[in-house]
Amino acid sequence: MTKPSPYFAHPQAIVDSTQVGQRTKIWAFAHVLKGARIGKDCNVCDHAFIEGGATIGDRVTIKNAVLVWEGVTVESDVFLGPGVCFTNDLLPRSPRGVFVGPRHEGKDWLVKTLVRRNASIGANATIVCGVTVGRHAMVGAGSVVTRDVPDHALVVGSPARQIGWVSPSGARLTFDASGIAICPETHTRWRLTPDQRVRALRPARKPDSSKQS
C-alpha cells in the first residue's frame, strides 16, 4: 500500500524534491527540483520554479512565476509576490561559452541570498544576489534590491532605497520626535533607536492591587 503524501501537489506540478513539508500545497505547472527544501504549510503557486539548493521555511507564500535559485534561503512566514526573481551569480556568463574560465568548473560563481523571517517582496521585484532582506522588511513592487535591507525597512525603486519603516503586520510606522511609533493595526508600540533599529516596546505593567503598601 502506497503511503499518502504529506503534502499536496497538483497533477500538473513537477515535484522532484523529497524534502517538502506537511500540508504544503504546490499548484499547476510549478516545478520543484531535486535538492530543494520546502517547509510546512507553504503555498507554491502556478509556474513557480524552485531550484535544487534553495531552502524555503515554513508558512511561506510563493505566488505565480516566482524564480528561486540555488543559494537562496527564504525563512519562515515570508511572502514572495508574483514574478519575484532572485539571482545567484554577480558575473553571469554561459558556462557553455568558449570564453568562460575555471570559475564555472565548481561553485565559485555562486553568491548566496537570505530573506529573513516575515519579510515581504512585492510583485516583479528583482533581488540581486549577495544581499540580506531583513526581518519584517517590505520590498515594493518592481524594485531592484542591490544591497541589504534592514529589519522593518520599507524600500522601493531601482536601485531600491528606503522610504520608511513597517511593523510586523506590514503597517507603516511613523515615529515622533522621541522616536516612538504606534502600529495602526495592532496598536503595539515601537522605538527607533539612535543606530536606526526598530525595537518593540513592552506595555507598562499595571500595578498589582493585591499588594498592600
Image: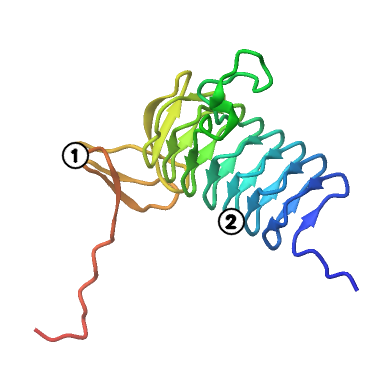
Foreground: 4 or 149? 4
Residue at numbered disc 1: 194
Above/below status of 5 relative to 52: below
Residue at numbered disc 2: 58
> Hey, which quadrant is residue 166 in on the image?
top left
Local SS, label 2: loop
Q: Residue 116 shows which numbered tag?
A: none
**In the shown orientation, is residue 76 left or right of residue 189?**
right
Residue at (28, 42) in percent of width and height: 197
Q: Which of the image's four quarters has the C terminus?
A: bottom left
Q: Nearer the viewer, mark 2 or mark 1?
A: 2
Residue at (19, 39) in percent of width and height: 194
Instruction: Looking at the image, tell me whether mark 2 or mark 1 is earlier in sequence order.
Output: 2
Above/below status of 103 relative to 28: above
Q: Where in the figure is residue 170, as x and y percent of width and height?
A: 47, 43
Residue at (56, 32) in percent of width and height: 122
Q: Where in the figure is residue 119, as x and y percent of width and height?
A: 49, 43
Foreground: 111 or 77? 111
Foreground: 183 or 96? 96
Under mark 2, the amino acid is Asp
Q: Residues within 10 Å of mark 1 (few under 14, many from 20)?
A: few
Q: CA distance from mark 2 to mark 1?
A: 33 Å
Q: Is residue 61 visible?
A: yes
**In the shown orientation, is residue 62 left or right of residue 128?**
right
**In the shown orientation, is residue 73 left or right of residue 208?**
right
Local SS, label 1: loop
Above/below status of 207 relative to 74: below
Q: Where in the figure is residue 43, as x and y percent of width and height?
A: 69, 49
Q: Are marks 2 and 1 in contact (CB under 8 Å)?
A: no
